[in-house]
Image (tube, grey):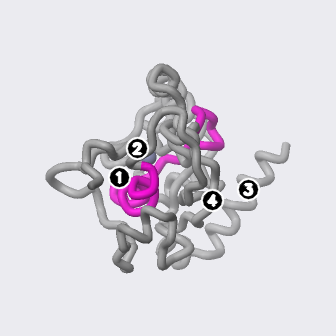
Amino acid sequence: MITADKFVHAKRKGKKGGKGNLTATVDRTNAAQGKFPFTEINGFKLKEVEWTVPDKQTRKQRRRAFNAVRTEFLKHIGTTMEPALREMGLNDKQIQLVKKGRAPVGYNVHHKLPIHGGGKNEFSNLILMPIGPHDELHHKVMDPQVAQMQSGESKKVVIPWTDDMVYVSPERKKSQPQKSALIAKALRARSER
Ligand SMILES: [Zn+2]
């Protein structure tokens, strides 16, 4: 039996931080084996990776180091990706907060490959996103596959992946395809420099 306290993030109590867009019900048995009735969730594409659980000390160190990296990451996207932040739905006040290295209420910085799976505090492994769809990535896709894994264990795990560092919901991308394409192009041009 999988217990809730084994999950990477505990289930949040009380009010939900916004809804995800997933309609399909996930069968826990299939999910535990990395089998899902969808190939994308909340705009993230499912991708198979090698998930290796670092020892407890390494995980602890990496989580501690993340506090400083989170600040730097937020300052980075605040100063270089303002159009994307706006497209995600942030207002001026919230964007000012991001520029100072702080996440607006209801948003958090997610490790695309979590620290529990061997993920590092690199900007390319991070994305700022709303808590609702964020929690869905963990609870519906990753947790069922990795809840029983111990330190040092390694196996193939399907994770939701995107190259983006700022989350824009599939609905928003669909409603403003040209704008999204322009922003994506600008971001690519910047990273190629
Ligand atoms: Zn996360």
- Magenta range: 119-146
Q: Given this view, does label 4 or label 1 mark the residue nearer the observer?
A: 4
Q: CA distance from mark 3 to mark 4?
A: 28 Å
Specify few, some or many for label 3: CA neighbours under 10 Å numbering under 14, 14-19, or 20 or more: few
Task: Identify the residue at horizontal 38%, vertical 79% (top origin).
Answer: 24
**72 shown above or below 48:** above
The residue that label 4 is drawn on is: 48
Q: Which residue is mark 3?
A: 186
Residue at figure coordinates x 27%, y 55% from the top left: 1
Mark 4 or mark 1: whose residue is earlier in sequence = 4
3 and 2 marks in contact (CB < 8 Å): no
Check disc 3 and report its element: helix, strand or loop. Answer: helix
Viewer-nearest of labels 3 and 2? Answer: 2
Give the alpha-carbon distance from disc 2 to disc 4, as whole Å. 24 Å
The quarter of the picture where residue 182 lies is bottom right
Q: Is mark 2 within 8 Å of ligand 1?
A: yes
Q: Are marks 1 and 2 in contact (CB under 8 Å)?
A: yes
The residue that mark 1 highlights is: 131
Res 106 label: none
Q: Which of pointers 2 and 4 lies earlier in the amino acid sequence?
A: 4
Name the mark nearer the viewer: 2 or 4.
4
Is there a contact, CB below 8 Å, between mark 3 and mark 1?
Answer: no
Q: Main secondary structure of the magenta part?
A: helix
Residue 153 placed where, x, y %?
53, 39
Where, quadrant-wise, is the C terminus in this rendering?
top right
Secondary structure state at the residue bearing disc 4 = strand
Residue type, numbered disc 1: Ile
Q: Who's the residue at 53% across and 42% down the image?
A: 117
